Amino acid sequence: MIPRYSRPDMVAIWSPETKFRIWYEIEAHACDAQAELGVIPKDAAAAVWKAKDVEFDVARIDEIEAVTKHDVIAFLTHLAEIIGQTEARFVHQGMTSSDVLDTCFNVQLVRAADMLIQGMEGLLAALKRRALEHKDTVRIGRSHGIHAEPTTMGLTFARFYAEMARNLDRLRVARAEIATGAISGAVGTFANIDPAVEAHVCAQLGLEPEPISTQVIPRDRHAAFFAALGVVASSVENIAVEIRHMQRTEVLEAEEFFSKGQKGSSAMPHKRNPVLTENLTGLARLVRMAVVPAMENVALWHERDISHSSVERNIGPDTTITLDFALARLTSVIDKLVIYPDNMMSNLNKFRGLVHSQRVLLALTQKGVSREDAYRLVQRNAMRVWEEGADFLTELKADAEVRAAMSEAEIEEKFDLGYHTRQVDTIFKRVFG
């Protein structure tokens, strides 16, 4: 990803320096295990650790790869230059390139998942704080973009919290599923390497041994990982779209914080645009873009091919870096979001009581009016509000058929906003415990 949408700690996970350091640790731990089994001399295994404080020369490795056309061989050649050819001949005993590549990739994905989980926890804290702050701030709920019935801003934040809490669970499951390693040799049979080597390397790297690999770790694990990231990205967009709607001039129930000196438009000095949440909508598309290629990587030829390799070299860094940035940005947006309760109430009252139509409908049915007739009576008066700018309560009181079933006081009681928020505490207990 470009630096504009990247954070340094996540970028570092995918740097060549980090990758080669993980490759080295895999090889060094494997040598230790081989030495314990008596496959290689213990002093040779110890010699490999001479490179533990060495910074691998990325340019040199690239130079070797330009000749060998093989990245793992290029790295091993460079390692031999550091520790000496005599000891280096014992490195990579019985291993195949995928043992290094796949195990390293999963280490990187686990580290990335840990950062994403941390980011999600920060977002959840922000959503919870704003939910509690605005638990009783009434706003109009909308369906199809049209006024429906009253809700609260706190419930809006609470439902986003619940969604992101589910996503936190998904990230944890994805992390657990991807946290496997394989040191099983060519076609995964352990013919040239003892399974104890795999067990040792995985233990040192915080992974579980892959129960059965071919020459690669099965890619259904990776498909599930990137699918989980795609769902998280969609939830980011879900929140972003709601904020973008709330910031529309005609709505203006909330808006992104507009800092001192910030400019909204090169042409129109008055503009204050929802640029951060628009950006989040775009970033979510980039994360989801990786899901289908990850799914298609599951089907490989026989015990191994590398059709997945070029895909993963891109989607591994790009999706995790992008989602990490998106979670941090969304957390900041939620933390600083400016809320306008007065505008919320003004919008709720814009159509002069129409939002109470269901309560009147239900009350009429309770008074013995058929549902069909009750709907007809309420809709008849509601349409005068839409089309003529009438007041809903006034129209209902003046309707002889409605008054035949309900008194004026009974009609007025159905316009109590508190009725719509009486279960907010119950919902909050469900969400926050």
Image (spheres, rainbow, N blue to C red):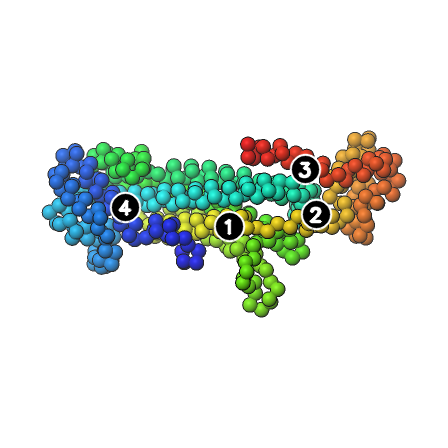
CA gap between label 2 and label 3 equals: 14 Å
In primary-sequence order, the first of circles 1 and 2 is 1
- Return the residue at label 4: 22
In primary-sequence order, the first of circles 4 and 1 is 4
Label at residue 421? 3
At label 3, the amino acid type is: Thr
At label 1, the amino acid type is: Ser
- Return the residue at label 2: 345
Q: Position of residue 322 (x, y in %)?
A: 43, 52
Q: Position of residue 376 (x, y in %)?
A: 80, 41
Question: Mark 2 falls on what kind of element?
Answer: helix
In primary-sequence order, the first of circles 4 and 3 is 4
Q: Residue furthest left?
A: 86
Which of labels 4 and 3 is toward the front? 3
- Return the residue at label 1: 332
Q: Are marks 1 and 3 in contact (CB under 8 Å)?
A: no
Q: Quadrant of residue 45?
A: top left
Q: Is residue 367 above or below residue 135?
A: above
